[in-house]
Amino acid sequence: MQPTLESAGRVSLRELIPQGRFFGSNDIQFESCCGDALRCESGDLFVAIDGQDGDGHTLYREAVQRGATAIIAERPLPTNVPVCVVPDTREAYGSICQLLAGRPADSMHVVGVTGTNGKTTTSMLIASILDASKSRVGVISTIGRSDSTHTKPAARTTPVPPEMASWLKRMSSNGCSHAVLEVSSHALSQHYTAGLQFDAAVLTNLRRDHVDLHGSVMNYRKTKARLFEQLKPNGFCVLNADDAGSQAILPNLDAPVITVGQREPAEITATVIERHSSEQTFLLMAGNESVPVRTQMIGDHHISNCLEAAAVGLVLGIDLATVARGLEAIERMPSRMERVECGQRFGVYVDSADNPDRLAIALKALRKVTSGRVLCVFGTPEYRPADDRPMMGRVVERAADLGVLTGGHIPHAEPLQALHDVLDGYDRPARAHLIPTRSQAIEWTLEQAMPGDSVLIAGEGRLGIASELNSRVLPCDYDIARGWLHETARAEPTYSCFN
């Protein structure tokens, strides 16, 4: 759904899009625009977008009837209101929304973060570093939107153009000097960030993902690379030298590049000093300087996220000690290897790993800090491609000592078929434990855990919080696990349940 966006005064479309072809007028002056024909109001500039709500090119008459005084389209339309024809209405829409909002990003340093995995965590780490430097920072991420004073939950990773412009305006009006934007491949393909220029563009990694949306791995990578095309003339890139996908696009970048890595040569590196189930310490090295960083989030992937965030902070002029404080300030992230602690003698982690790659990364991280067995509760979300299902089963069979296959809190349309698809990935399907009800699967797995073991609850994380089924609020993975551990703690005097 595309809401209306208004400005404080009339603006010229020809000044914004001089290459547009105008029909019925030499220019279009407007104060508001809308990308949804059914929500147009009097005086709106209607942007004809082919989207989930229908093709705006077939609904333009409805927009005019509702008061639209001009149209932006990708082809001429038979109408009595002025029309501006552009190659891509989505890109034009993003630029128009930023213009109507007064180009708020121009007054801030804007950092964009994209990649297959780690976008949210890296975005929050960057924001934490900026906060540690006493900068006022706004954030747009999967977790929520913040103008540095007020925070709201997010319905999607990257907001649609009117919402994007509105939040950036709130940040600018609130005195933010920096804005950190998590940018999904969907947002890049739909030009949600059109009209923005970035001071820094971070690519966390490039793996196989969203092939169903982009058509091929190559298209997916090209879409991710669009972020670098929006860099300011003096902007810079941050790339992960340990990631082959990121390295593949390096020769095509026409901007300064800062590389980070743990295994491959890079400008900013890290060496693990010690690692435990509840924390890890690594030495962060940049040039001739180094500083130890102690973080309560575990895994090599988290160190990579820290390096990428550190690179942004250092290039923006923040000293290494402040960078370290910012990294250490993030103690936990919802559904990102989030520990559930009730004093139990085994580890419990909730992660929203919903694809084979993320699941493998999470299990690998736990294997390195687990003296006993690694147990995994997992499923396959309905929105994920069916091709992922056998690979999920293959990952768990190879990386976990016990795999418990289950469904989602909200059942699939064809739950048994989805579970059978996962089992197809097993060499020995009999090794999989199948418990279709997710809450029962979590509780049963926790019952099997012994001292020294680690339990990974993967696939949904905290998604169940806002879900309702038959007017019943459904719990999330974290709440189910913590509830079971809390009851066990009441029965076991040696436990002491805490957040």
Image (cartoon, rainbow, N blue to C red):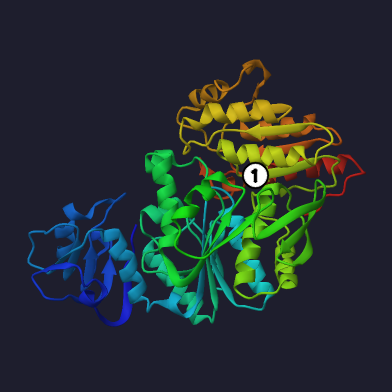
Residue closest to the eye, 166 or 115 = 115
* Position in image of residue 327 (x %, y %): 71, 63
- Left or right for 428, reference 69: right
Secondary structure under the numbered disc 1 in the rendered image: strand
Number of marks present in the image shown? 1
Q: Residue at x 80, y 42 (%)?
A: 369
Q: Residue at x 46, y 27 (%)?
A: 414
Please say if 425 is above or below 439.
above
* Position in image of residue 390 (x %, y %): 54, 26
Please say if 198 is above or below 205.
below
Q: Residue at x 50, y 77 (%)?
A: 108
Residue closest to the eye, 485 or 139 = 139
Residue closest to the eye, 190 or 499 = 190
Query: Which residue bears the numbered disc 1?
Result: 351
Q: Residue at x 52, y 74 (%)?
A: 109
Residue type indicated by callout 1 = Asp
